[in-house]
Amino acid sequence: MLNLCDTTKLDHDELRALIESDLKKDLHMHTTFSDGAMTPEELIDMRVKEGYELLAITDHDVIGGSVAGMTYAKKIGLPFIYGIEFDSEDAVGDDLHMLGYGFDPENEIFLDVVIEVIADRNKRNRQFMDALNTRGFGITEDDVKKINGGRYVGKPTFAKILIKKGIVSSVNEAFSTIFREPDLKAIKKVTMPSKKAVETIHAGGGLAVMAHPMEQRRRDESFEVFKPRMFHIIDTMVSYGIDGLECYHPSASEMQQELLVQYAKEHGLMITGGSDFHSLESRRDFDVYHRP
């Protein structure tokens, strides 16, 4: 019998069994600790009202939301798994995301990498703000802190500041105009190699899962052209030691989900899924990946 009250005591086989159980679950969600709109407590309460029985918060590159979520979940008696979503890159694909589940949030090796990623992001954000201010926008640290309490800062943060200042009317406008200028485009985020992301999750005692494979598809790419390339990318992640594949995600159509599940079963990978929730207002265009 699995101890659902404290998932931190589960070994890998037990954790995998829980993740692949028939419980109603959402194992891919974001909060105000990264680029989500709800606090961990608000998000958990919403999902509980919707009848969910197992949750994981997977904020980008940080664990504060997941730690807060675990504390609250234990308080209300809800099964909860520590989670994170690392951005990574590899020769076979850019912007590859790696989900980590069931790690020890106090593991020193794991924490060192998280701290390093945060430091790199802070450095990039300072460069980005300086570049915006050369245009006379007058963005201050105080402006940044007013967006999401300053807990997570990225390009969307600066877009929201520009909206407040009346410089642009929407986040999309900021990204399609100002942020496309050469000096701003040149400020790139430092992204860890995908193999390192997998190794970091394993070092922390967790299970590594490749997130939303369909999001590697290019907008002008037919599915028949993409399919062998997708499997090559997943094959490479398997060679790095991933434990699972996110087969159920809004970016995958029903047919594509079936293909991913088949691949996972053939390669002994854990099958996971989640909503990739950010906010009630956010409606990402996942249908672009469902094309023939």
Image: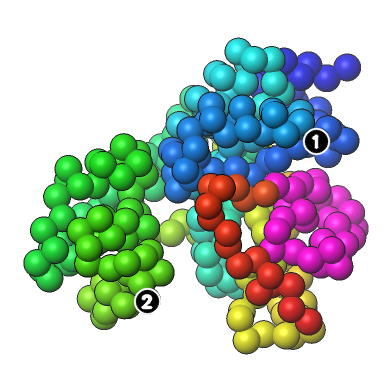
Residue 156 figure quarter: bottom left
* Label 2 CA crowd tier, 10 Å (few <14, some 14–19, many 20+): few
The front one of 228 and 152 is 152
Give the amino acid type for the residue marked by disc 2 in the picture: Ser
State the residue position of label 1: 24
Q: Percent x, y for residue 59?
A: 51, 42
Q: Residue at x 65, y 55 (%)?
A: 211
Q: Is residue 84 left or right of residue 50?
A: left
Magenta-colored stretch includes residue 290: no
Write down the region rendered in magenta: 245-274
Residue occupying the point 53% across, 55% down: 282
Percent across and percent down for residue 117 are 39, 48
Quadrant assignment for the N terminus? top right
Is residue 265 placed above or below 73 in the rendered structure? below
* Residue 15, visible in the rendered structure: no
Looking at the rendering, which quadrant does residue 205 occupy? Answer: top right
Rendered location of residue 162, percent (x, y): 25, 61
Task: Find numbered disc 2 in the image and state the secondary structure of the residue it sits on.
Answer: helix
In the displayed structure, 78 sits above or below 282; it is above
Q: Answer with the quarter of the image where residue 42 lies.
A: top right
Placement of the C terminus among the 4 image quadrants: bottom right
* Residue 201 higher or lower than 5, as above or below: below
Residue 68 visible from this viewpoint: yes
Q: Is residue 153 left or right of residue 287?
A: left
Residue at point 44% right, 39% down? 32
Q: Which mark is residue 176?
A: 2
Front-most of 45 and 228? Answer: 45
Dot 1 falls on a residue whose secondary structure is: loop
Q: Residue at x 28, y 49 (%)?
A: 122
